[in-house]
Every structure is written in C-alpha cells, then in structure tokens.
C-alpha cells in the first residue's frame, strides 16, 4: 500500500499540536483577564441613574450619615433605598428649581417612586445581611469603598465569593469598633490584626464557622 502522507506531515502534525496548546493557553489567559476586567465585574464603572446622586457632595460635603438615607442597615438584611420624601426633606427648601432634580420633584408630585439602578447587586443564590455585618464591626468602606469620594456611585470591589472569603477566613484583618462602622476615614490606632484579634472575642465571632457554605448559600 503506498504511503498516504509524506514524511513532512510529521513536522506539520507536531507544529499543529504545539500551536493548539499555545492557543489554548492564550485563550485561558484572555478569558481570565476578561473575567477580572471592569467590563465584567463593573468595578470602578459609575452606573447611570435617573438622578445623578453624588455621595461625595452629600457625605463629604454636607456630612450626612449613611443611616440618614439607608435607614434599615442596622436592623435588616437590606440597607434600604431612601424614598422621595427623604430627598424632599432638604430639596423642598434648597435647589428647588434645579433641572437636575426634576425627576425628584416629579416623583414627589405623582407619588411614583424613583427608579434607582442597583450598583451592588448580588445573585439570588447569595444571602447577605447588612445588619449582622454592621453588628460585627464591618465598616461600610470595607465593601463599598470610599463612597464619600464618589461623584457617582460605582462598585469598589467585585463582591465575588473569593473576595468575600478573604474576610470570612481572616476577619481580624478587617473588623473595627462598632462606633466606627460608618466612618469613612477611620484608621486603627494600633496594628489592625492586634485590634481585630481583641474584637473577635468581644463580638463573639467564630472564624471556623464563617466559611461554611450555609452562611451565604441558603
């Protein structure tokens, strides 16, 4: 039987295998880069809103506490979105004719709530409770970043499981005194892990239980 392939095809076959391995590796690297990119995670990408609310103006500029708008953050899983009434507490007196606030005035006049775009939106299979994190000394900044410096709100962290587990595995690196949870600028007066180790006992945090799947997936 005559030879079907010439000897040169051996080199072609070897080159094809090497090229396939190279392409598979390049595709894996490219996929990983895309998976971590802001295009996918939305980290540092401001989200457009009906009203371009500025935390920098309201928090840093006016000194408004997080709890003034997010009223249920200490008592419920959901931090709460302020109703139009909260906005109009001030804006019935200041910036009353500002075009940028027309959606707020229209909402107030019609009784139709403003529609905000959620910036931090976890999947439905993830259970997250704001109140327990506040009670255990997790600062707003830890998850949400320096919102007092954000003219428009964006995600400061991916909120992916691997990111959450960094804290659940070593909470002493992140927790703070409860009276500093809502502070944007707080820094520890002693090494964080020294403070954290003491607070673990004070808050009765059982580190070994925090990585149990049922904590977040119920």
Image: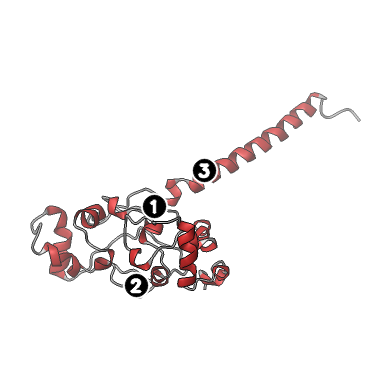
Whole-percent x, y for residue 192 in the image: 45, 57
Q: Are the residues at dot 2 and dot 3 in contact (C-beta closer than 8 Å)?
A: no
Q: Are the residues at dot 2 and dot 1 in contact (C-beta closer than 8 Å)?
A: no
Whole-percent x, y for residue 108 in the image: 15, 68
Q: Which residue is mark 1?
A: 156
Q: How many residues crowd mark 3 within 10 Å: few (<14), some (14–19), many (20+)?
A: few
Rounded to the nearest whole Å, what is the CA distance between mark 2 and mark 1? 21 Å
Q: Is residue 201 left or right of residue 182?
A: right
Give me the residue at 55% from left, 45% from top: 32
Q: Nearer the viewer, mark 2 or mark 1?
A: 2
Give me the residue at 72% from left, 30% from top: 15
8 vs 31: above or below: above
Q: Which residue is mark 3?
A: 33
Q: Is residue 48 left or right of residue 44?
A: left
Whole-percent x, y for residue 211 in the image: 56, 66
Identify the mark at residue 200; answer none if there is no mark. none
């Amino acid at each position: 039987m005559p030879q079907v392939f010439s000897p040169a095809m051996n080199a072609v076959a070897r080159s094809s295998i090497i090229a396939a391995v190279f392409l598979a590796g390049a595709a894996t690297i490219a996929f990983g880069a895309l998976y971590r990119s802001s295009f996918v995670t939305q980290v540092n990408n401001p989200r457009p809103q009906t009203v371009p609310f500025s935390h920098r103006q309201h928090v840093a500029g006016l000194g408004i506490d997080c709890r003034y708008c997010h009223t249920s953050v200490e008592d419920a899983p959901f931090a709460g979105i302020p109703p139009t009434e909260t906005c109009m507490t001030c804006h019935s007196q200041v910036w009353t004719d500002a075009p940028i606030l027309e959606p707020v005035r229209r909402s107030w006049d019609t009784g139709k709530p403003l529609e905000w775009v959620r910036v931090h939106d976890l999947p439905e299979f993830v259970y997250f409770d704001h109140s327990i994190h506040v009670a255990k000394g997790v600062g707003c900044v830890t998850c949400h970043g320096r919102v007092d410096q954000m003219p428009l709100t964006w995600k400061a962290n991916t909120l992916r499981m691997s990111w959450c587990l960094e804290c659940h595995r070593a909470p002493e690196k992140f927790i703070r005194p409860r009276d500093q949870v809502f502070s944007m600028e707080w820094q520890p007066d002693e090494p964080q892990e020294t403070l954290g180790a003491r607070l673990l006992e004070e808050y009765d945090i059982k580190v070994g239980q925090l990585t149990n799947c049922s904590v977040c997936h119920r």
